[in-house]
Image (cartoon, rainbow, N blue to C red):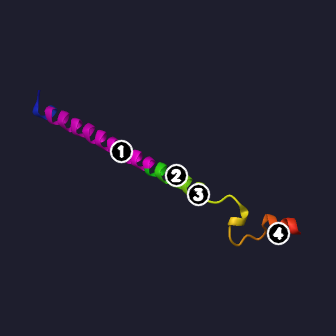
Amino acid sequence: MSPALQARIRQLQAEAEHRRAVAEFRERHEAERQARIAALMTELVHTLAQLPLEAEAWPNQHTTDAQRRAA
């Protein structure tokens, strides 16, 4: 095998390795991004679950049930 052919084979192998490394990085980055989104969504759901459901519990309501019944 000629030295030029050997050099070309090494070059193609290096390019393939680089493409694999880039693909792995992108996959890892996307997985981390999805994990951050999932954690934020979990935190959001937990926070929303802590909020009171009654209108009287919310300050500065323009109209509460009691005001509507009195009118």
Between the C-alphas of marks 3 and 1, the distance is 33 Å
Between the C-alphas of marks 1 and 4, the distance is 55 Å
71 displayed left or right of 44: right
Mark closest to the chain's N terminus, 2 or 4: 2
Query: Furthest-bottom residue in view?
Result: 60
Quadrant assignment, res 8: top left
Between the C-alphas of marks 2 and 1, the distance is 20 Å
Q: Amino acid at mark 2?
A: Met
Mark closest to the chain's N terminus, 1 or 4: 1
Front residue (pair 45, 13): 45
Above or below — where is 43 with respect to 60? above
- Rendered residue at 61%/59% (across/down): 51
Q: Amino acid at mark 4?
A: Gln
Mark closest to the chain's N terminus, 2 or 1: 1
Quadrant assignment, res 4: top left
| Front: mark 2 or 1 | 2
Q: Which residue is mark 3?
A: 50
| Front: mark 1 or 4 | 4
Quadrant assignment, res 20: top left
9 displayed left or right of 37: left
Q: Which residue is mark 2?
A: 41
Q: Which residue is mark 1?
A: 28
Q: Which residue is mark 4?
A: 67
Mark closest to the chain's N terminus, 3 or 2: 2
Q: Residues within 10 Å of mark 3 (few under 14, many from 20)?
A: few
